[in-house]
């Protein structure tokens, strides 16, 4: 299979997988919000956010370094992967072990502290899985990752149903996430055996080499946490669980949508890394431009559609009790463009091995974001949190673009972005003039969204914002 065919296959299979996992994720969200209510879902959001803080620190930048290091020419793949696995295992034990201890000292109720102990277990398996995912990305066999993820999502839905039927409350749902995560890792490990029998290795010389690549990422990840997770943590300390629940429901929709750019960036990162190390600057810039265009083509219409459909979407997914999340989602959705477009530049920074150049940017954005959270959340609650999220994502996207420009002189062209805005405007008008009552049932919402997609892509095609050549050029290794 040619490189272009492999990329096309991986892109399609991941899109299909993400569609399935998104649907299953929304089903899980719908069941949890209706069962737990605002306050209960607020406690769930607090628990997951608290533990994820430690899980992300435990990453130490190893997730992205995995793809970068094994994509370089003449690399000893098995040796690096096994040592990455060993280093990851130690970091998980250390950092996730701290979560229950610090939770015990935090001013949380017993329900939340118990939930943190359970949820801590569920984060062990995704952390180990990331090394395997890096291997699948490099081999362009993300279909294996899709199989593992889809199976675990199905099991999670089933587990939540069992927890609800048994009346086991929040803890029952958290145990379902633990089992689901374990299944995901187990399947991924089995599917990777065709390439490697993964086992932890403890070659400290290799560990030093890995850390020499990952330490800038580790620092930026910690700083990244300050502006990504502080909003929910501050809300959980000074506002009610119900307010945290409203914010968490809206943020969960954003989390679902942002899997798309990171999925695509995961496919493109090995290509960018290889082309940069092989001094194919023209191809590097072409792939980055087409990736930038593709992110604009998908993100801008999502923003336009959400401005019309946010309230009915939230009510249909989370239930009437979460109606207030609709306006929060309308604000948060503006961060999506920065996440989509910034994601490509952030991965390009890694491809050219300039991670340490982003440290200063992350320090600035993190400190200013935390200050703004502490000022705006007490005054404006979740609206203040959403506004700062937009600021932080946009700032990091611009800093990443600047670092890429410094070393590659790449400046994105905005022709496709402009045409995407025009086509999205046409789509928005169509949605705006459909009677609002039509959106408040699943059939009406799906029909409206489908019509919007058709109108958008047809409009984009008419103004030549997308052509057959644009769809194929990213997959042509000769260009």
Image (tube, helix red, strand yellow):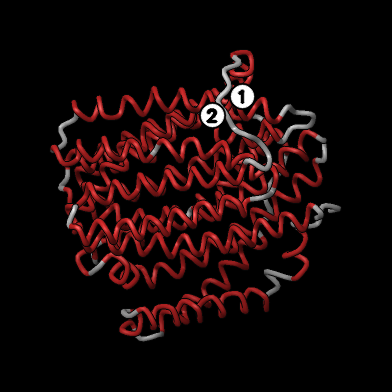
Circles 1, 2 touching at the beta carbon (< 8 Å): yes
Instruction: Tell me residue 352's x, y (percent).
Output: 69, 33
At 52% across and 63% down in the image, what residue appears? 300
Given residues 292 and 43, the one toward you in this image is: 43
Distance from label 1 to label 2 (Cα)? 8 Å
Reading the image, the residue beneath label 1 is 213
Q: In screen coordinates, is 465 left or right of 145?
A: right
Query: The residue tagged with tag 2: helix, strand or loop?
Result: helix
Q: Which mark is residue 326?
A: none
Query: The residue tagged with tag 1: helix, strand or loop?
Result: helix
Q: In screen coordinates, is 124 left or right of 206?
A: left
At 30% across and 29% down in the image, what residue appears? 99
At 61% across and 24% down in the image, what residue appears? 213
At 32% across and 73% down in the image, what residue appears? 312
**Which quadrant of the figure has residue 26?**
bottom left
In the figure, 173 relative to 400: above or below? below
Q: In screen coordinates, is 391 left or right of 354?
A: left
Q: Which mark is residue 217?
A: 2
Which residue, as the protein is rendered here, is positioned at the far right?
Answer: 478
Q: Residues within 10 Å of mark 1 (few under 14, many from 20)?
A: many
Q: In screen coordinates, is 269 left or right of 158?
A: right
Instruction: Tell me residue 180's x, y (percent).
Output: 40, 49
Q: Is residue 365 shown to the viewer in this render?
A: no
Q: Residues within 10 Å of mark 2 (few under 14, many from 20)?
A: many
Instruction: Tell me residue 261's x, y (percent).
Output: 55, 53
**Which quadrant of the figure has residue 190?**
top right
Instruction: Tell me residue 447's x, y (percent).
Output: 45, 82
Quarter holding the N terminus is bottom right
Given residues 184 and 379, the one toward you in this image is: 184
In the figure, 418 relative to 221: above or below? below
Given residues 449 and 409, the one toward you in this image is: 449
């Amino acid at each position: 299979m040619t490189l272009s065919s492999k990329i096309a296959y991986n892109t399609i299979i991941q899109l299909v997988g993400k569609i399935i996992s998104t649907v299953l994720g929304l089903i899980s969200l719908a069941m949890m919000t209706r069962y737990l209510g605002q306050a209960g879902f607020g406690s769930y959001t607090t628990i997951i956010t608290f533990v994820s803080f430690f899980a992300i620190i435990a990453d130490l930048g190893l997730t992205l370094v995995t793809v970068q290091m094994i994509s370089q020419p003449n690399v000893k793949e098995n040796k690096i992967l096994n040592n990455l696995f060993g280093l990851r295992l130690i970091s998980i034990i250390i950092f996730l072990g701290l979560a229950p201890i610090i939770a015990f000292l935090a001013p949380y109720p017993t329900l939340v502290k118990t939930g943190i102990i359970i949820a801590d277990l569920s984060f062990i398996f995704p952390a180990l899985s990331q090394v395997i995912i890096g291997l699948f990305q490099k081999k362009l066999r993300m279909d294996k990752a899709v199989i593992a993820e889809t199976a675990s999502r199905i099991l999670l839905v089933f587990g939540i149903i069992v927890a609800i039927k048994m009346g086991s409350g929040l803890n029952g749902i958290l145990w379902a996430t633990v089992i689901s995560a374990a299944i995901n890792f187990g399947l991924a490990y089995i599917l990777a055996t065709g390439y490697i029998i993964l086992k932890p290795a403890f070659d400290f010389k290799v560990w030093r080499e890995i850390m020499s690549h990952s330490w800038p990422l580790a620092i930026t990840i910690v700083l990244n946490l300050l502006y990504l997770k502080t909003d929910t943590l501050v809300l959980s300390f000074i506002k009610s669980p119900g307010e945290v629940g409203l914010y968490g429901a809206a943020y969960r929709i954003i989390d679902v949508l942002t899997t798309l750019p990171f999925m695509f960036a995961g496919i493109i990162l090995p290509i960018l890394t290889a082309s940069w190390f092989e001094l194919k600057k023209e191809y590097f810039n072409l792939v980055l431009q087409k990736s930038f265009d593709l992110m604009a083509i998908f993100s801008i219409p999502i923003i336009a559609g959400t401005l019309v459909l946010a309230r009915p979407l939230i009510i249909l997914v989370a239930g009437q009790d979460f109606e207030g999340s609709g306006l929060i989602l309308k604000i948060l959705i503006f961060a999506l463009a920065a996440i989509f477009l910034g994601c490509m530049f952030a991965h390009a920074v890694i491809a050219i091995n300039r991670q340490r150049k982003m440290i200063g940017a992350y320090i600035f954005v993190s400190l200013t974001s935390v200050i703004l959270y502490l000022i705006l959340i007490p005054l404006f609650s979740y609206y203040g949190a959403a506004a700062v999220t937009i600021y932080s994502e946009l700032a990091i996207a611009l800093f990443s673009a600047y670092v890429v420009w410094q070393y590659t002189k790449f400046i994105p062209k905005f022709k496709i972005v402009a045409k995407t805005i025009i086509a999205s405007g046409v789509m928005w008008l169509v949605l705006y003039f459909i009677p609002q009552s039509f959106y408040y049932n699943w059939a009406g919402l799906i029909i409206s969204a489908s019509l919007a997609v058709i109108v958008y892509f047809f409009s984009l095609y008419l103004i030549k914002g997308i052509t057959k050549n644009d769809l194929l050029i990213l997959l042509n290794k000769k260009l």
